[in-house]
Amino acid sequence: MKNIDIKDFNQLEVKIDYDSIMDKYSKKAKNILVVESPKSNRPNRATPYSQGWTVNKRLTKKGSERVIWNETNWQLTHLLENGHFVTNVSRHIVWVRPRKHIKQTYLSVKNGYIRAMQKAKIKADLK
């Protein structure tokens, strides 16, 4: 390893490959959601709820972030995750129990993601 003089720090370029880790774990979470999410069996839907999950990469002032959301039935995610009231045929109001598929996916991917970020390789090169 090369010794670096304190004067050379302004010429030091440090790279940490967080983007590839974020891509890997966001795709993993998306794939889990496709398998674990409740299936939409309605014939009038063009694409089922479980197939609508997508990952978007956004650049922010702090860096980049990944957003996993349901592109086809985005309104349904809140209702399924938290439960909701519906009116059935006989005009009774019925509570539909929540199906916690998003939070379970988050919890299953979270620990592996944190460990991967902590073990990320740091590359330091002089310009």
Image (cartoon, helix red, strand yellow):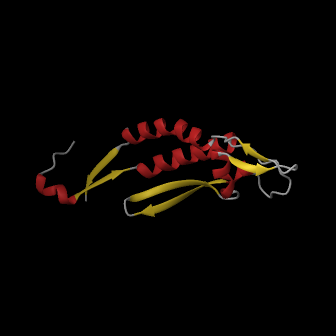
Q: Is residue 84 left or right of residue 89?
A: left
Q: Is residue 30 above or below residue 63?
A: above
Q: Is residue 3 left or right of residue 66?
A: left
Q: Is residue 107 above or below residue 53?
A: above
Q: Is residue 33 left or right of residue 116?
A: right
Along the line of sight, the residue nearer the viewer: 95 or 26: 95
Along the line of sight, the residue nearer the viewer: 87 or 117: 87
Along the line of sight, the residue nearer the viewer: 7 or 63: 63
Q: Please state the horizontal and vertical placement of residue 3, each as a whole percent of the image.
A: 16, 45
Along the line of sight, the residue nearer the viewer: 70 or 18: 70
Q: Is residue 36 above or below residue 63?
A: above
Q: Quadrant of residue 98?
A: top right
Q: Please state the horizontal and vertical placement of residue 91, each as a whole percent of the image.
A: 84, 51
Q: Is residue 24 above or below residue 57?
A: above
Q: Residue at x 22, y 42 (%)?
A: 1
Q: Quadrant of the C terminus?
A: bottom left
Q: Please state the horizontal and vertical placement of residue 50, each as a whole percent of the image.
A: 71, 48
Count of numbered marks: 0
Q: Please state the horizontal and vertical placement of residue 37, each as a whole percent of the image.
A: 68, 43
Q: Is residue 126 left or right of residue 19?
A: left
Q: Residue at x 62, y 54 (%)?
A: 54
